[in-house]
Image (cartoon, coloured by chain):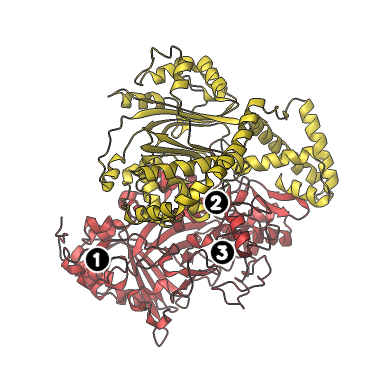
Amino acid sequence: MTPQSNFMIVATVHDGQLDELRAVLAGMNKSIGLADPNNPLLPFGRFDRLHFARFTIIEARTANEIAAFDVSPRPWQPALAFIGDCDGDRDSFLAELAEHAGAGLERIFSFCVGFPDANSNTLLQWMKTHHIEPAANYINWLGRTVRQVHEEAALHNSLSAYLQEIVDEVGRENTRVLRQKLLSHVELEKQAGRLTLTPPARTPCRWQIKNGLHKIGIPLILALLSPLFLIAAPFFAVRLRMLERSDPELFIRPTREHIQALSALEDWDVTNQFNVFGDVKPGLFRLLTFKFLMLLTDYVARHIYNHGFLTRIRTIHFARWVFMDDNRRAFFASNYDGSHESYMDDFINKAGWGLNIAFSNAVGYPTTRWLIKGGAEREQQFKATQRRHQLPSEVWYKAYPDLTATDLARNSRIRKGLEIRQANDEEIRAWLSEI
Amino acid sequence: MKNSSDFNFGDLQALLRFGHKKLPDTCFLLLNVQDADAAKQWLSSAPVSSALPAEHMPDTALQIAFSAEGLRALGITESVIQGFSDEFIIGMSGDESRSRRLGDIGANAPEYWTWGGDAGQVPHALLLLYAAKNGIKAWRKTVEGKLFNSAFQLMRQLPTLDIGETEPFGFVDGISQPNIDWQCRQSTDPHDRDRYSNLLAMGEVVLGYPNEYRQYTARPLIDPKTDRFAADLPNAEDQPALKDFGRNGSYLVLRQLDQDVPGFWKFLDQAAGSDSVKRDQLAAAMVGRQRDGSPLLPLAEEDIPGIPSDDKFNRFNYIADPGGNRCPFGAHIRRANPRTGDLPPGVTGFVCRLIKTLGFGSKRPDEDLVASSRFHRLLRRGKAYGPVLTPENAIKANATVAERGLQFICLVANINRQFEFVQNAWAMSSKFGGVQQERDPLLGHRQPLKSGIDTDQFHRPDPDGPMQKTCHLPQFVTVRGGAYFFMPGLSALKYIASLPNNHKDDSL
């Protein structure tokens, strides 16, 4: 199994160069909202380990909202973020990027303060030092590589066309015959070089050890600290409720121009990109709560929700939460299936409590009760706040156009059904019905 | 708990409560305000029908709704307009991104519409007149009166025709409607129920009342201190110091949908190899009902709230058909209302609820893709047009070609979360509920995805295994016009009518 990793390279943009940078980035798009996989600056499509990537200019458009907490807003210099998710480890992928797209990346990063930088004399070194590790990271299906996605999609297409042919020939009733024919078809196609089904690679040893330690380490530490938590719990509860009652609630409608600019980038693929950026609520209590909840989010995403669903949500490919600006601000980015409205409704209705856990410590979030109640259930306030804090992606790349997470999972099941021997006719029928 | 009699139906337009099915003679007019003063004067005495039940069935009805531009033309201040939702202010055709989401692309694109396609020229008002058989002429004359012609310019009379209970393709229509919970009998707390219910909170169709989230949908509220004309408007329940211009009103979505009746039946006939039984089976699978309206599923064993237990057309959900073997996932009515509850089926008790809430315990990978139908319901009030053409005649080579279709009307409190969501995420989506390469078999356009993947198929899951696939569906329904309107409550209509010329909000 090849584990996935992520990168997020962030650097401040030179004063007065934002417009020019935007123009350069826009040149990487094939059409509005979709990157050209072969663009000369960074030919994303050449990197067969790359799932998703984006360039986003992180601006603090809502920086003044924190004034409602009687905290004076801090200045923020717009920053360029290069974000992506890839197969295998980060460093080797960044090295690949530097090797095959060095010139283009240098051109893009030349808009950033401190590039090149005397201490990190190579592009690779610079990218590594400017990477920000997410506080929590979500991968829809741990171990599913880009190559696997493409191979399984091709398999499904081939099987689907051939099944139609043989159904017309032998009828649909004799499922065992159908299956046999499909198996031989795949063998022939493989021999002819039209289909490939690469077996999974060996799980890297270092990763396995690290992951295992993380898996038992975090609960162990939490268990050890649990007496402390028990003592702190009543104080925590009182303080939390005090803040939840007193925190100002901001119901500010985003401007129509802002929404139109964002939605102009959406719904060109069945998947969309999403970025939000805002302030962490002031005070140590909120920050520690936020950090602790992110630790838990990261843990469950890493060890529990790594096979197709994040609680009841099955539409997110990759997502990450990142603290920035000395923990004063938080950034979230995701790749989700369906329209923005359906993404939000799905979340509010299926996992509103999860949204509240993940975002209620940020400025502008609708009032929650006990961290999990309320919040996103205040539907219109929630939708206004997330749109208001949303930032466009200047460039967005997806390695498998028009395939949803549901499609990818189905294609994997179809492949699996090919490789195992079904126990009975019922299972064969279930397998055939997915093709 | 309130009794039905406690509720003030007198301030609602009748269309929110009654479908006017007994008034088959109709006339739908799109108007522009020509002389605002005359229009307001006309409005002040217009016999707009209220939802108050009359002792005798009335034999006429009048309903009226305005676009954002229409409200402006009548002198509603910009600060009030800005209290409406973005989609209402921008309009159905006012933003390319919206058109893309609604599937208004290709032949459906606003540039080809016969009305409403130019966002700058959306009609100001929609007048819906209903009368008993052969009564519409006289009723129209009564309604219009003297001032009408100087007040309004008739932009277009939309075709309508009484063809009985069926829509032009020949299926009994308008069967499934949400049952509005006027008495607030049902709790909207997700902890109190997780199954599908057909009872719907008032606030989902009428502004000014709590919706299914127990929230008040944003709407224009007016400070009576700065606008003395607002004094007679009802107070906002959630902000009693303010007057509620939206209360008892509703958004009205109108779309003129052209239906290619011969094209539909000829395609089905060909796909079924001219076997009339197979043809009807395929048609029923696409619609999700037989032509007489009966569902493809047996009746649910337990009662569904808001559906009479003897309603053999509606007392069903899809729990018994998780694989879509009886009613395909992609069938029109399964897309339009998946009848799902807040949690996937089979929740029994606290532990099970917790497990499901955390996303575990799925029997099928697709069992929880579409949930919480209650937030996406539409109250439909459409009307067909064009001469009847039976399927049997439609497949003949010499089938009469004529303009046929539906003036689709729905009433909602939140255009974006209800109408646009259903249209985009359910009807037009080529990925709805995990389907492959298909959009709504009736409503859908057939544009491929950007990467070239076709979306012009229709799949019928089959208990034998392989799905039955129908390929190369042509487009059967084409959008010919559309707009978003606001249908005010009666006191809001009075407020509009009372506004003096050059009305301005004093606070500005």
Nearer the observer: mark 2 or 3; the answer is 3
Q: Are marks 2 and 3 on the same chain?
A: yes
Gap between marks 3 and 1 measured at Cα: 35 Å
Q: Which residue is mark 2?
A: B444
**Quick check: A275 above or below B308?**
above
**Quick check: A161 above or below B403?**
above
Counting residues from the start of the chain, the first of labels 3 and 1 encountered is 3
Counting residues from the start of the chain, the first of labels 2 and 3 encountered is 3
**Residue A64 visible in the shown view:** yes
Nearer the observer: mark 3 or 1; the answer is 3
Give the residue at x 42% y 42%.
A288
Left or right, A371 with respect to B284, comes to left
Q: Amino acid at mark 1?
A: Leu
Give the residue at x 62% y 36%.
A142
Q: Which residue is mark 1?
A: B242
**Quick check: B404 above or below A262?**
below
**Quick check: B319 above or below A346?**
below
**Residue B104 visible in the shown view:** no
Rendered image quadrant of residue B84: bottom left
Q: Chain of mark 2?
A: B
Gap between marks 1 and 2 measured at Cα: 43 Å
Give the residue at x 83% y 39%.
A181
**Residue B75 x/y as whole percent:** 20, 61
Nearer the observer: mark 1 or 2; the answer is 1
Check the rendered structure and report the hue given to chain A. Answer: yellow
Q: For the N terminus of chain A, give its image quadrant.
A: top right
**Residue B303 x/y as whole percent:** 61, 74
Q: Which mark is residue B194?
A: 3
Q: Chain of mark 1?
A: B
Crowdedness near tag 1: few (<14), some (14–19) or many (≥20) residues, C-alpha within 10 Å = many
